[in-house]
């Protein structure tokens, strides 16, 4: 049986997978910087806490979107990189980046217009 939300919007499972709170910045950083160690990745996504980064990396590895490579050295070294599966998302990210560059000014203008109309409506209602 298919989830009702999935029926209404078949891309919802992908949105939950790829566009959750920290997934996109992590994948973006790995796609643009290549293979990174944990601390390098944390510097690339500075607002994430170490605990959350660890949790997200484990989930991304489980989902097949990140490859973790352990090097048995002293001290041990662990590196992360996007998987071949994640590389198929790069055109999606590129399209969203292009859309953002072309349309975010329109979104900002729409928000200002909406906020102004709401403020005027509230002022009118107060009398």
Image (cartoon, rainbow, N blue to C red):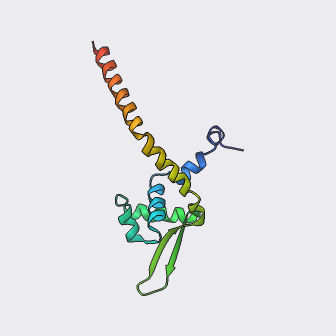
Where is residue 126, by image quadrant?
top left
Q: Nearer the viewer, residue 115 or 109?
A: 109
Kindly identify the residue that appears in the image at 55 percent across and 52 percent down.
92
Residue 19 percent coordinates (x, y): 50, 51
Question: Furthest residue to the bottom?
Answer: 74
Give the quarter of the image for residue 125.
Answer: top left
Quadrant position of the N terminus in the picture: top right
Using residue 92 as the reference point, say whether residue 116 is left or right of it: left
Q: What is the x, y in percent for residue 86?
A: 56, 61
**Image position, residue 87 (x, y; %):** 56, 62
Name the residue: 48% across, 44% down: 99
Residue at image position (55%, 50%) is 16
Front residue (pair 51, 71): 71
Q: Nearer the viewer, residue 52 or 67?
A: 67
Please give left or right for residue 47 compared with residue 2 in the image: left
Q: Based on the displayed image, in which of its 4 quarters is residue 44 positioned?
A: bottom left
- Residue sitting at x 34%, y 18%: 121
């Amino acid at each position: 049986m298919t989830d009702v939300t999935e029926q209404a919007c078949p891309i919802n499972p992908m949105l939950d997978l790829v566009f959750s709170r920290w997934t996109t910045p992590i994948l973006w950083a790995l796609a643009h910087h290549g293979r990174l160690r944990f601390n390098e990745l944390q510097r690339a996504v500075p607002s994430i806490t170490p605990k959350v980064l660890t949790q997200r990396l484990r989930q991304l590895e489980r989902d097949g979107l990140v490859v973790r490579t352990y090097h048995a050295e002293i001290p041990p070294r662990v590196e992360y990189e996007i998987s071949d599966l994640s590389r198929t998302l790069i055109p999606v990210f590129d399209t969203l980046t292009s859309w953002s560059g072309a349309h975010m000014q329109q979104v900002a203008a729409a928000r200002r217009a909406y906020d102004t109309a709401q403020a005027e409506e509230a002022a009118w209602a107060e009398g």
